[in-house]
Image (spheres, grey):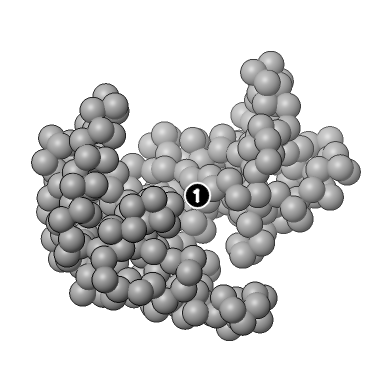
Amino acid sequence: MPGHTLAAVRAYPGLQGPDEPVHKLLAYLHPRGDATWRFVDDVLREVAALAPGPFVHIGGDEAFGMPDELYREFAARALEAGRATGKRVVAWQEAARSGALDPADVVQEWVGAGDEFDADAARERIPSEYHALVEAMAAAFAESARDVPAAVAAGAPVLASASSVLYLDRRYAEDSRDAAQTARRTVVGHESYEPRTCRELFDWTPGTLAEIPAGARLAGVEAAIWCETVEGFDDLAFLLLPRLAGIAEKAWTPGRTGWDGHRVRLACHPAWWEALGWRGHYRSTVAFAE
């Protein structure tokens, strides 16, 4: 919230407030209605009670088409509502635009270097009836480079989830040792991201990500997987493995590790995955020897 709420707004139209969205597929929670804050408080209290951990995530990303003033107002009040649950608040990087972060909050960085939104390419790819969506997205992403520096200036620690190396809905650039999998790699995973090899996605360390400025306090690392192209468990295994093993090594190993050593350690993993039912893992020609 406040974006990614089309289902909620259609179920409870009063949450949208008086403003007409710029496109029928866009909606946001309006910060100036009592119904909105009753809804937000109810949801956050319920989620906080269900989760035993110390954090609650309030969202905050991709509020496409929402005026900047309303977004700032919403994010600031949502941060307060999250804190009122007694949990530490986590929010996507756009929440830094509210100017309301404090050092106890955690900001989740996600817009990866090289994955900037290309409005011209999007207009060419989709029908004109959706171009208003493209304009709203372009306006939101135009601000993204300032988000994380603003969060760091506010003293908030940063959770690294850069799409450049930590989004596992990115397609593979290399073939599989299984020809059928090689054919599927143009279907499973998002076409909007440039395909990269397992080795390319291994070449990073948490403390040197280009997306996080020097001097930031690093809260941790979180891989992400979005499932618009996932139709079953094997598709999920296909995208997660073997890349998730490399992310775990980078996140949990104090020193920098190299690709050759990682491949040696990775060699025994497929047998374990298959024993656990993850038989759809990708047989990468880059990650695994003959």
Furthest-top residue in this view: 275
Q: Taking 181 as reference, is 279 left or right? A: left
State whether residue 53 appears in this view. no
Label 1: which residue? 166
Observer-nearest of 6 and 214: 6
State whether residue 36 appears in this view. yes
| Residue at 67% over, 26% down | 278
- Dividing the image into 4 quarters, which one contains the N terminus? bottom left
Within-10-Å neighbours for mark 1: few <14, some 14–19, many 20+: many
- Residue 63 image point, x, y percent: 36, 65
Q: Taking 278 as reference, is 178 left or right? A: right
Observer-nearest of 114 and 62: 62
Look at the numbered disc 1 and give the secondary structure of its residue. Answer: helix
Residue 113 vertical placement versus 172 (above, below): below
Quarter-of-image position of residue 49: top left
Q: Taking 257 as reference, is 174 left or right? A: right
- Residue 12 image point, x, y percent: 33, 52
- Residue 279 image point, x, y percent: 73, 27
| Residue at 38% over, 37% down | 254
